[in-house]
Image (tube, grey):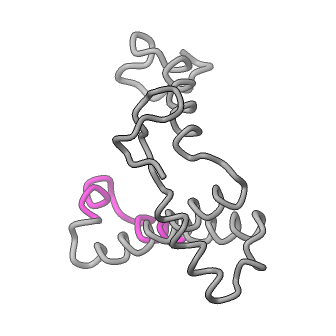
Amino acid sequence: MQTPDTPAADDTPRLLDVDALAAAVERFARERDWVQFHAPKNLVMALTGEVGELVEIFQWMDADASRDAARDAATAQAVRDELADVTIYLVRLAAVLGVDLDAAVRAKLELNARKYPVDKSRGHNRKYDAL
């Protein structure tokens, strides 16, 4: 198992190490005989539901309130709980599909850097095809 300081296969330091979490969630599911319910389609639907619950917290907040949601006593615990649920389902989905999230994230960051070069995208939110 690699740690965040352990280089990936290409000697690039890992950005994301979810091995321990993936193992803990697998163990949790096995202990309850829930692996049978963890088809990718089911996990995607569960993930979507949890993202929806996170959205619900922020739905009617203004931009400033949303920045403080994780510190506001009225919303902080719910934000933490829903972020945890989203993370758990995302990591479980990746594990079931055999996706290396670290490699996927690094590849996507590289692609986004090419699609959104600093000199063309700094300071605005236009999509890459409108740069």
Query: 65 or 81, which lies in front?
Result: 81
Q: Tell me residue 78's x, y (percent).
A: 37, 76
Image quadrant where one finds the C terminus:
top right
Note whether 24 is above or below 6 in the view shown: below
Q: Main secondary structure of the magenta part?
A: helix
Note whether 83 is above or below 122 in the view shown: below
* Residue drawn at (28%, 65%) of the image: 70
Q: Tell me residue 129's x, y (percent).
A: 62, 19
Number of residue marks: 0
* Residue drawn at (60%, 46%) of the image: 100
Query: 1 or 74, which lies in front?
Result: 1
* Residue drawn at (37%, 19%) of the image: 122
Q: Tell me residue 30's x, y (percent).
A: 65, 81
Q: Is residue 25 magenta?
A: no
79 with respect to 90 (left or right): left
* Residue drawn at (69%, 63%) of the image: 44
Which image quarter: residue 93?
bottom right
Q: Is residue 64 magenta?
A: yes
Q: Tell me residue 98's x, y (percent).
A: 69, 52
Note whether 103 is above or below 89 in the view shown: above
Note whether 93 is above or below 100 in the view shown: below
Q: Residue furthest bottom?
A: 32
Q: Residue furthest top?
A: 119
Query: 9 or 64, which lies in front?
Result: 9
Q: Which residues are magenta?
A: 53-69
129 with respect to 82 (left or right): right
